[in-house]
Image (cartoon, coloured by chain):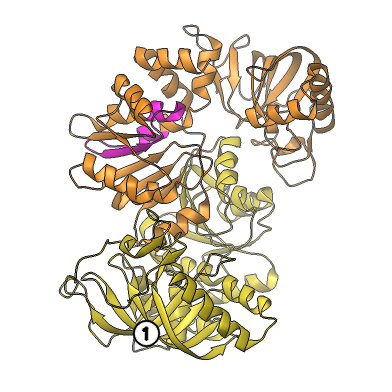
Chain colours: A yellow, B orange
Amino acid sequence: MVKGNKYGTHRVIEPKGTLPQPAFKISNEMTIYDNEILIDVDYLNIDSASFTQLKEEAGGDIEKIKTRILEIVQERGKMQNPVTGSGGMLIGRVEKIGEDLKNKIELNVGDKIATLVSLSLTPLKIESIMEINPDIDRVEIEGKAILFESGIYAKLPEDMENTLALAALDVAGAPAQVKNLVNEGDTVLILGATGKSGLMCSYMAKKMVGKKGKVIGQARNESRSKFLRGTNFCHEIIIANVLNPTNVLEETLKANGGNEVDITINCLSIPNSELSSILPVRDGGIVYFFSMATSFTKAALGAEGIGKDVTMIIGNGYTKDHAQITLDLLRESNTLRTIFEEKYI
Amino acid sequence: MVKGNKYGTHRVIEPKGTLPQPAFKISNEMTIYDNEILIDVDYLNIDSASFTQLKEEAGGDIEKIKTRILEIVQERGKMQNPVTGSGGMLIGRVEKIGEDLKNKIELNVGDKIATLVSLSLTPLKIESIMEINPDIDRVEIEGKAILFESGIYAKLPEDMENTLALAALDVAGAPAQVKNLVNEGDTVLILGATGKSGLMCSYMAKKMVGKKGKVIGQARNESRSKFLRGTNFCHEIIIANVLNPTNVLEETLKANGGNEVDITINCLSIPNSELSSILPVRDGGIVYFFSMATSFTKAALGAEGIGKDVTMIIGNGYTKDHAQITLDLLRESNTLRTIFEEKYI
């Protein structure tokens, strides 16, 4: 066989010149190129926005959802919801590794992996759908998929349930980025500290700032605050309304001896929290937006409007070794693992 | 008098708790607080989106536009277009400086300044509108305005036309950020290098990378490329379609000996160029989005989809000393100044 493009453009059928994700149709021919990996798929984890849409369209009828999934994959060569544009991830076993990759990657035939690139760009062929579990957006199938050379994945660990690993991998980018951004002695504000990525980020930030630093976690009410206090992941906890930037600023200053923080990490899932993220940060500090509800223009104009010279970073779902870094947190902290087992699987 | 809030929240009338920009109504009472500056306003430069809307609403009738501007300022205490939400900037002379600021800022009564924060958050009172020049969105008024302690401004220089200074200040954030981001020896790709901010960024990037670095400017066609070549602001010029990421990648690799670049600066004004910005950058590199047409989610999911570990930065309109840095470029380069005089005033 021959070598394909690192990003999979050799499989784009239409429109030409685009990458596999924005493409309408890609080739799901299952003969692999020398720099591709063939996966024998067990499950698709459809992303939540997509699955909700499919359920509504089918009026909750599981058989109709099955038919629709088969249609989509037939038409596009990938499981990309035409309405939401989103995909999800998959779990399967490595069936074949292209010649070019064999000695370059730490993966063997038979390894169980989760793909960390979206299903919206992954060539997929479904033989049959065995079962759908609508409670956790999971589709059990018989089928194959292909990973491109640039495709990222995680080996599923032996020491934890697949579902636990998946719940953590879903937000893997966030704590890995915190590890890179936060330095010893920093003061860090975590907005949305009680959520899935917020907990991970708080824990990682506390590790990174060391004894001289401080992690301030924001919770939206007394009961959430109490829960967060129980984890011991933050040095200080504030209760503040993230839609009220002045409130967030004042509570942060109170918790930090009147000083602004070095870094804000926004882990919220609601819109209009840009100014609440920017306002408490010192000039020269960093605002890291992990929230997918962030508005680019609101952040850009917001910082200008208050004359804040801060570096604002778009949360990248991928960082080197992010899967490993994140799974290790679950191994390290029983508290974190227990919360994830109770709340997210 | 007393000291007001640094960001002007003491003037917010409704809704309480918000900052002056998102607020519906702020106080334009012209007695200043100790940390405010009173400005005798000469001109309002209404931002282009807002002025276009006002013109359309008034069917092009100048008198109707005047009435509408007076109504808006009467109702809101600031010139914030209710439809577009945007403002603009103003030019005027410093009339009074609050006690608290007198020895802290390099500004004297009588200095001619341009405010660099939006009119959408600036307390304004209009006595009368003398003239409107619809060609350059300029409104000559008799009136007063107030700058908060956090409000940024630029002294208008004696050695250039106000209009020239304004044209440069409009994109001041971009070259100032390039100065911070780009290091000696870097290879930098500028998307939209032939536009207003693109030219500034190319010139600044070439200064920063020195003899060992390389600046690659993207132009969309042969005539633009020829124009850019004439400036000598870039080491290499590529003609590429920014809506086709593969095309941008291939042309960049050709211009850079097969290597990815260290930094992309996106100075485009059109949407859907996120992947074209991300794809040509090496792992560990930087993507700086100055374009207001950037989509946060397309950038975040785009980088994840191709497994790129890059730092993506949201262009902040404000950076320390950005006005000075940018005006100095016009003084330094006759080529840049001539282009700005011919094209942008």
Q: Position of residue A189 (x, y in %)?
A: 53, 57
Q: Residue at x 40, y 77 (%)?
A: A124
Which quadrant of the figure contains the N terminus of chain A? bottom left
Q: Is residue B207 visible?
A: yes
Percent of width and height locating residue B286: 35, 47
Give the quarter of the image for residue B72.
top right
Q: Is residue A222 left or right of residue B204?
A: right
The magenta segment is B177-201
Residue at 53%, 40% in the rendered image? B292
A54 horizontally vs B256: left or right: right
Q: Is residue B160 above or below residue A199?
A: above
Which residue is more in the foreground, A200 or B232? B232
What residue is pinned by disc 1? A92
Q: Nearer the viewer, residue A45 or B6?
A: A45
Pointer 1 indicates a residue of which chain? Answer: A
Q: Please tell me which residue is depicted at 54% across the width and 70% down the height of the picture.
A: A81
